[in-house]
Amino acid sequence: MGAGRRPGKPDTRGAILDVAREHFVEFGFAKTSLRGIARDAGVDPALVHHYFADKHALFLAALSISFDPVELVRRVASEGPDNVGHRIITTALTMWESPMGVTMLGAMRSDSALFGVFGPYMVEQIVKAAMAALQITRDEAQERASLMQAVMTGLVFSRYIMCVDPLASLPRELLIRDLAPILQHIITGDLDPRRARR
Amino acid sequence: MGAGRRPGKPDTRGAILDVAREHFVEFGFAKTSLRGIARDAGVDPALVHHYFADKHALFLAALSISFDPVELVRRVASEGPDNVGHRIITTALTMWESPMGVTMLGAMRSDSALFGVFGPYMVEQIVKAAMAALQITRDEAQERASLMQAVMTGLVFSRYIMCVDPLASLPRELLIRDLAPILQHIITGDLDPRRARR
């Protein structure tokens, strides 16, 4: 590619990422638009699309997340409902305790606005993808997603960001053993005990 | 009481509360001392004791909490293990949705350091009181308290402070129905399925 055909200055991608980060923190994932980012970065919207496939890809890049959590949870969930609670908690703990996860948590600890944007993303995109992959009916999905949201938000925030004991120092194996059946119940169990007896 | 016997200037109590709030936010509940607060407020430690029965009372006053959550959870838990999950979630939601709870949540939303001090307090003092009132053995208490910590922190933080859907708009009755058996399992259930089959 000749110099005359370069799509932007060398720091254009970085400038887009900086503006994107600000927008995601200020407006959240759902209300951020690529058009608004392009405008505030002073570039053509086509240039944003040149660097990033879609809003989701731009979001992950802006938060320095080098893998796709939605794709990961979709893969884990699509193996079916048997033992999905165990697979989800194992995958989540493995991710948060990986070098990538530790870096993300460090960033969220030092800048709480990042957790403010990742938290809702985790719920809106990741939990939603899990529900869809498990073919949970729409009216039950809200309820099961809410319970999953409570457990996963509390786990990440309290164990990894605030680091509050006893959760912060509970051995990983014990946490997996204890949370697997709780998540399994939340995802596939009968939530209404009266209905179960009928 | 004559003017000459007044234990401090009219704003002494307020000055102690201001310093106490700073100390609790900076050092957390466990590491804050009445002696340190007295020193930084420039008053005699005896004066702190004159106004506040103990550190716990001073903590509640500093956070403008006009009831004792530890006493409340102790009362709820001491009715015994049957249906304790239902009683705890009903009491917690009633408290957070009362005028007092709404005021506390508003303060935590506008000053996240307050959640940083109340979160650990909730776990260290309130969950511990529940475990003790239910006579849960010491080695199991850490494990059950960790799971309760994950659920309750996630519930308060995500539903009431960050206000993230779907948890934030799930009807209260549905949340009570769904979380009661989960909390019951966390508090009294068999956490080790292999042990349960033996």
Image: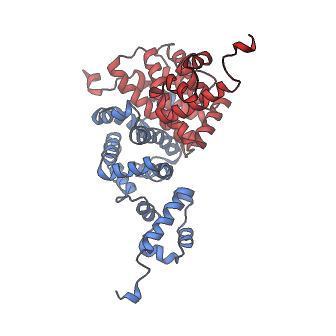
Chain colours: A red, B blue
**Where is residue B21 drawn, in percent x and y?**
49, 61
Quarter the N terminus of chain A occupies: top right
| A197 sits to left or right of A65 | left
**Where is residue A41 drawn, in percent x and y?**
58, 28
Residue A176, relative to residue B72: is it above or below?
above
**Residue in the foreground of this view, choosing between B47 and A177:** B47
Quarter the C terminus of chain A occupies: top left
| A193 sits to left or right of A165 | left
User: In which image quadrant can residue B66 be found?
Assistant: bottom left
The count of marks equals 0
Whether residue A94 is visible:
no
Residue B91, relative to residue B197: is it above or below?
below
- Identify which residue is drawn at 61% across, 15% down: A50
**Residue in the foreground of this view, choosing between A167 and A163:** A163
- Identify which residue is drawn at 58% across, 21% down: A68
Whether residue B23 is visible:
yes
- Identify which residue is drawn at 46% across, 16% down: A81
Q: Residue furthest front?
A: A4
| A106 sits to left or right of B78 | right
- Identify which residue is drawn at 58% across, 23% down: A43
Residue B29, relative to residue A78: is it above or below?
below
**Residue in the foreground of this view, choosing between A137 and B17:** B17
**Residue in the foreground of this view, choosing between B177 and B43:** B43
**Where is residue A136 drawn, in percent x and y?**
39, 17
Q: Residue furthest right?
A: A2
**Where is residue A185 drawn, in percent x and y?**
41, 25
Q: Residue furthest left?
A: A198
